[in-house]
């Protein structure tokens, strides 16, 4: 059994693979102050009903949590081969970026998973703490992309900076023209971000000179997939699928 761990700024997602089949996944809150021992307690609790993993693949955008994960695996899973995505790890993804070291490991892993699944050119729209637009060439190269504030960041900013506004549940409102403050906020957030996504995808397509296949992934992808016009496929576990491929290439 392979354990894959995707550490994001908001959530840590765990995936369990039997061969190439993802049969279980878990999502826990990311705590930047978490310790290795606390992580071990959470991991052992979640994995208690499953056989011990015989391999681990990790991708992290949070350095402090990655450091504690390394300590945890060294202490509690010392006999399990572990691959951490970073410099020196084989991904097979050419990074056509001015400074490849600036590319987040999650963006590399998503590119690795997207190409064999859907071909290219492709755009991966990752709805997380930030909204990432990652562009994949027809050859599977990472061409670059765009980064924007995520939906939840915008919700928090509005509630913090506007005296009469408040946090709302992220659901689709009855109509674009909101009849309450809550509905107006929901409309502006969901349809506003949908307009951003569709506009960015069309600009990227113009620059590529052809229409790419567009994938939605990330924690809020299930919500945005229903309101965006340019998203072709919903692949919420794309990063976990990419981590499995990274492990196979480095085993």
Image (cartoon, grey):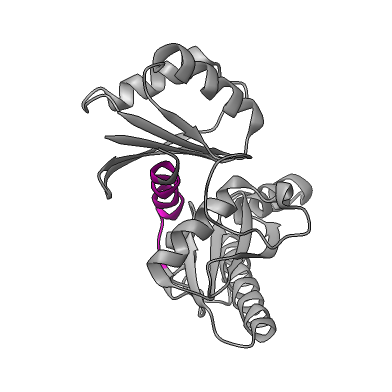
Instruction: From the top left corner, tell me how far across and down residue 28 is, in percent.
Output: 44, 34
Placement of the C terminus among the 4 image quadrants:
top left
Instruction: From the top left corner, tell me how far across and down residue 175 is, in percent.
Output: 50, 76
Q: Residue at x 40, y 32 (%)?
A: 56
Q: Is residue 20 visible?
A: yes
Instruction: From the top left corner, tell me how far across and down residue 145 is, in percent.
Output: 67, 65
Q: Quadrant of residue 77?
A: top left
Instruction: From the top left corner, tell me how far across and down residue 121 is, in percent.
Output: 54, 76
Question: Which residue is more in the foreground, 185 or 63?
Answer: 63
Q: Residue at x 55, y 64 (%)?
A: 125
Please tell me whether residue 246 belongs to the stretch shown in magenta. yes
Placement of the N terminus among the 4 image quadrants:
top left
Question: Which residue is more in the foreground, 168 or 240?
Answer: 240
Q: Residue at x 63, y 68 (%)?
A: 188
Q: Quadrant of residue 248?
A: top left
Q: Is residue 170 visible?
A: no
Work out whether 19 lies above or below 94.
above
Question: Which residue is more in the foreground, 107 or 29?
Answer: 107
Q: With 91 as the anchor, is 98 left or right in this view?
A: right
Give the number of callouts.
0
Please tell me whether residue 146 belongs to the stretch shown in magenta. no
Q: Residue at x 51, y 56 (%)?
A: 110
Work out whether 216 lies above or below 213.
above
Q: Which residues are magenta?
A: 234-248
Q: Which secondary structure type mostly characterizes the magenta part of the structure?
A: helix
């Amino acid at each position: 059994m392979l354990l894959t761990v995707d550490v994001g700024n908001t959530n840590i997602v765990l995936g369990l693979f039997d061969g190439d089949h993802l049969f279980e996944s878990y999502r826990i809150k990311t705590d930047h102050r978490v310790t290795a021992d606390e992580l071990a307690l959470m991991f052992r609790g979640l994995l208690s009903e499953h056989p011990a993993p015989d391999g681990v693949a990790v991708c992290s955008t949070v350095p402090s949590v990655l450091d504690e994960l390394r300590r945890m695996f060294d202490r509690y899973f010392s006999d399990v081969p572990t691959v951490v995505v970073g410099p020196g790890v084989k991904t097979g993804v050419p990074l056509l970026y001015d400074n490849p070291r600036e590319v987040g490991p999650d963006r590399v892993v998503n590119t690795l998973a997207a190409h064999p699944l859907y071909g290219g050119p492709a755009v991966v729209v990752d709805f997380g703490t930030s909204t990432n637009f990652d562009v994949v060439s027809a050859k599977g190269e990472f061409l670059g992309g765009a980064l924007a504030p995520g939906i939840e960041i915008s919700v928090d900013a509005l509630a913090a900076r506007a005296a009469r506004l408040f946090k709302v549940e992220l659901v689709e409102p009855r109509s674009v023209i909101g009849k309450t403050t809550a509905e107006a906020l929901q409309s502006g957030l969901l349809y506003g971000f949908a307009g951003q996504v569709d506009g960015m995808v069309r600009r990227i397509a113009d620059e590529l000179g052809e229409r790419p296949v567009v994938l939605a992934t990330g924690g809020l992808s299930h919500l945005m997939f229903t309101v965006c016009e340019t998203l072709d496929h919903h692949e919420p576990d794309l990063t976990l699928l990419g981590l499995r491929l990274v492990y196979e290439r480095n085993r």
